[in-house]
Amino acid sequence: MDERSAPLPYPSGWFCVGRARDLPPGRVRTARLAGEDVVLYRTRRGRVRAIGPHCPHLGAHFGAGGMVRGEDLVCPFHGFAFGPDGSCTGAPDGTRLRGFLTHRHLCERDGALFVWWGPDGEPPGWELPPAVGVLPLAWWSGELLSHPQEVMENSVDFRHVSVLHGLDTRETAPPVVDGPLFTVHQRTTTRFPGLGPVSLEQPVALAGLGMMRLVAELPELGSTLRVWVLPTPVAPWRTKVRFAAAVTVPVPGVGSAKALDRAASWLALQASVRIIKQDRPVLAHKRYLAQPRLVPGERSIGLFRRWARQFYLSGPFDSESDPMQPGPAQSDPVQSGRTQSDSLGPGPMEPDPTG
């Protein structure tokens, strides 16, 4: 599938390109975002940069052998060095280049690195919300044959949560829309060993189509659960999704013990990963419908889709249609799940230690 045949284009916004801890001072890494390589590096003083991958001299790829020397990024082909501002600081023989590196907008948030993507180099139109003050303690990543919008839409599709995942999750109040932010209020009833049924109040906050944060208080345990879902488009209808979790478990007379927090975070992460694994074959074979036939109780899906329109240069929806209301299916819907690569079909998804 190419960009022209994909049911939805790449959305603009902030997307995770890796964990901050995987980019220590002096490291150079390559990430994939919206069909392009992005090269990330951290200077010896700790400044993080994201750039276009190719040297302006003769096009060498900085991610294939480039190195950090002090505050400079050095090209592996001819040794031209570039400072944090993107200007050339010289080559081994003293020659300077007039070309500049192509900088990409980057920010660190909640232990992750986010790069802005906009069509035609569009600059950031909004900022990510402030950090929550707690870093994830467990990470997992895998790829889906899907789109970030489809992944995020699951946060308001409560019917599928019951049918596919067997969870009793209900909306407690209508979603709240604030520009690029979308907050879902829900309650999940589940069972914990030794406690029986426990109700979790879970405000779920979406920041564009690249970050979802869930916070759930566990008063019976005096604990707080935080989960991050970070979908990143890497190719047309292919998304790398990262899950992260942090659980704080108080210990009488001690406070929060790191070892216990990490163990609890890992268990919470596995529960989240189990859910996306159940979603995966459905997402891989479902087709995107611009005019779904919604039924009573699914008003939030329509609201979510109208909110998501802002992240596209030209809306992916028919201007005459309202996804809030039931309507006919597309006359010629695109089969979004199947591509030329059978290797990406449903199968095992393994933990990615690099996040």
Image (cartoon, helix red, strand yellow):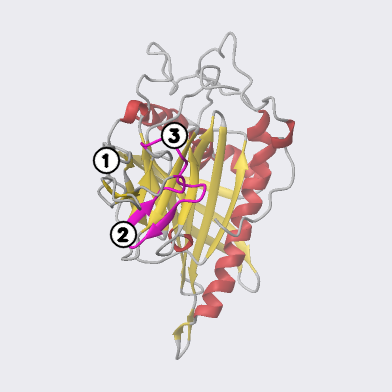
Q: Secondary structure at mark 3?
A: helix
Label 1 or label 3, whichever lies nearer to me, is 1
- Measuring from the top left, give residue 176's x and y in whole percent: 33, 41
Report which residue position mark 1 lands on: 126
Q: Residue most toward the front?
A: 93
Q: Amino acid at mark 1?
A: Trp
> In terms of secondary structure, what is the magenta stretch mainly?
loop
Which quarter of the picture shows residue 333?
top right
Which comes before the other along the chain, label 2 or label 3?
A: 2
Q: Secondary structure at mark 2?
A: loop
Q: Earlier in the sequence, mark 1 or mark 2?
A: 2
User: How far is disc 2 from disc 3 in space, using C-alphas?
Assistant: 48 Å
| Magenta stretch encompasses residue 66 | yes
**Above or below: residue 292 compared with residue 85:** above
Q: Name the residue nearer the viewer: 326 or 273.
A: 273
- Identify the disc placed on residue 258: none
Q: Amino acid at mark 3?
A: Ser
Residue behind mark 2: 71
Residue 300: mark in rendering: 3
Q: Which residues are magenta?
A: 56-77
Which residue is more in the foreground, 52 or 141? 52
Quarter of the image with the C terminus is bottom right
Q: What count of labels does the image hold?
A: 3
Residue found at x 40% / y 54%: 41
